[in-house]
Amino acid sequence: MPMPKQDISAHTVTQRLRMLKRVPPELIPLGLVIGTGVGMALFSMGRKVYVDKQLRLSRSARDNEHF
């Protein structure tokens, strides 16, 4: 049984860039601000995990149970 043809094809990079023209221009600065904020937050969290030596990244031994 042959597969039916799909109307959806893969988008190339240039086709996706052309889709940016459909975004209202007043939303582009908002997207840039949100993207910058998310990027800075990810950088800050990654740096904290990498630099902070007192941060526990795994469980400690269960020798001192108080139950």
Image (tube, rainbow, N blue to C red):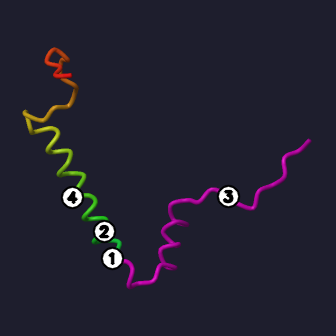
Crowdedness near tag 3: few (<14), some (14–19) or many (≥20) residues, C-alpha within 10 Å: few
Q: Is residue 29 magenta?
A: no
- Disc on res. 30: 1
The front one of 54 and 21 is 54
Crowdedness near tag 4: few (<14), some (14–19) or many (≥20) residues, C-alpha within 10 Å: few
| Residue for badge 3 | 9
Crowdedness near tag 1: few (<14), some (14–19) or many (≥20) residues, C-alpha within 10 Å: few
- Residue 49, by quadrant, is top left
Q: Is residue 42 left or right of residue 10?
A: left
Q: Is residue 4 left or right of residue 65?
A: right
Residue type indicated by callout 2: Ile
Residue type indicated by callout 4: Met
- Tell me, yes or no, whether the two marked residues, 1 and 2, touch with CB atoms within 8 Å: yes
Residue at point 9% right, 38% down? Answer: 52
Among the two numbered marks 1 and 4 on one chain, the one whose residue lies closer to the N terminus? 1
| Residue for badge 2 | 34
Numbered disc in front, either 3 or 4: 4
What whole-number distance in Å separates the C-alpha atoms at marks 2 and 3? 30 Å
Numbered disc in front, either 2 or 3: 2
The magenta segment: 1-28
Residue at point 31% right, 65% down? Answer: 35
What whole-number distance in Å separates the C-alpha atoms at marks 4 and 2? 10 Å
- Residue 8, by quadrant, is bottom right
